[in-house]
Image (cartoon, grey):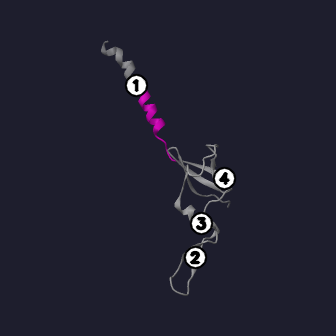
């Protein structure tokens, strides 16, 4: 096979390599989703239920329920407690959430509320 006969194959290989690079470069994609009654997640772009334990949640969304104690301000009397306000509570079924897709994993970033 002469040199001139392989240039077409080289061009094809180069095009295929470039297309594979573009496919594998997965930018961070933001999405909206909703926590279901069974605590699974359904997002707008992936409307299939993602079971609890198969998606991630930012740590700040795991603080606890509204009015749970977050911390005590001292160990001696008078004890002052800091409770978790509504805006800092953990996610619950029915919450609309902001989701970041990191490669193929959904990560719940925060609860979305109306203005």
Instruction: Describe the element under mark 4 as helix, strand or loop.
Output: loop
User: Tags 4 and 1 in contact by the CB under 8 Å rule?
Assistant: no
Above or below residue 10? Residue 88 is below
Q: Determine whether label 1 and label 3 are within 8 Å by CB.
A: no
Q: Gap in Å between the C-alphas at discs 2 and 3?
A: 12 Å
> CA–CA distance between discs 2 and 1?
62 Å
On the rendered structure, is 13 left or right of 95? left
Q: Where is mark 3, residue-wise?
A: 64
Say the numbered circle drawn on residue 82.
Answer: 2
**In the image, which disc is placed on residue 13?**
1
Q: Earlier in the sequence, mark 4 or mark 1?
A: 1
The nearer-to-camera label among 4 and 1 is 4
Label located before the other in sequence (2 or 1): 1
Residue 85 image position (x, y, % from top left): 62, 70
Magenta stretch: helix, strand or loop mostly: helix
Numbered disc 2: secondary structure = strand
Q: Is residue 11 left or right of residue 86?
A: left
The residue that label 4 is drawn on is 38
Is residue 22 located in the magenta-colored stretch of the structure? yes
Left/right placement of residue 17 relative to residue 111 reads left
Labels 2 and 3 touching (C-beta < 8 A) = no
Q: Could you tell me residue 114's position as x and y percent?
A: 68, 59
- Dot 4 or dot 3, earlier in sequence: 4
User: Is 60 one of the magenta-colored residues?
Assistant: no
Q: Which residues are magenta?
A: 12-28
| Closer mark to the observer between disc 4 and disc 3 | 4
Q: How far is the residue under mark 4 from the one under mark 1? A: 47 Å
Asked if residue 71 is positioned above or below residue 31 in the image, the reply reads below
**Mark 2 or 3, nearer chain start:** 3
> Label 4, label 3: how many angstroms apart (C-alpha)?
18 Å
Q: Earlier in the sequence, mark 1 or mark 3?
A: 1
């Amino acid at each position: 096979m002469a040199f001139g006969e392989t240039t077409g194959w080289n061009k094809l290989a180069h095009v295929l390599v470039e297309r594979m690079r573009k496919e594998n470069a997965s930018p961070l994609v933001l999405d909206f989703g909703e926590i279901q009654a069974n605590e699974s997640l359904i997002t707008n772009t992936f409307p299939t239920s993602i079971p609890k334990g198969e998606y991630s949640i930012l740590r700040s969304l795991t603080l606890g329920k509204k009015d749970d104690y977050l911390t005590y301000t001292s160990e001696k009397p008078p004890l002052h407690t800091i409770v978790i306000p509504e805006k800092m509570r953990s996610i619950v079924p029915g919450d609309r959430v902001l989701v970041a897709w990191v490669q193929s994993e959904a990560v719940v970033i925060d609860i979305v509320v109306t203005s």
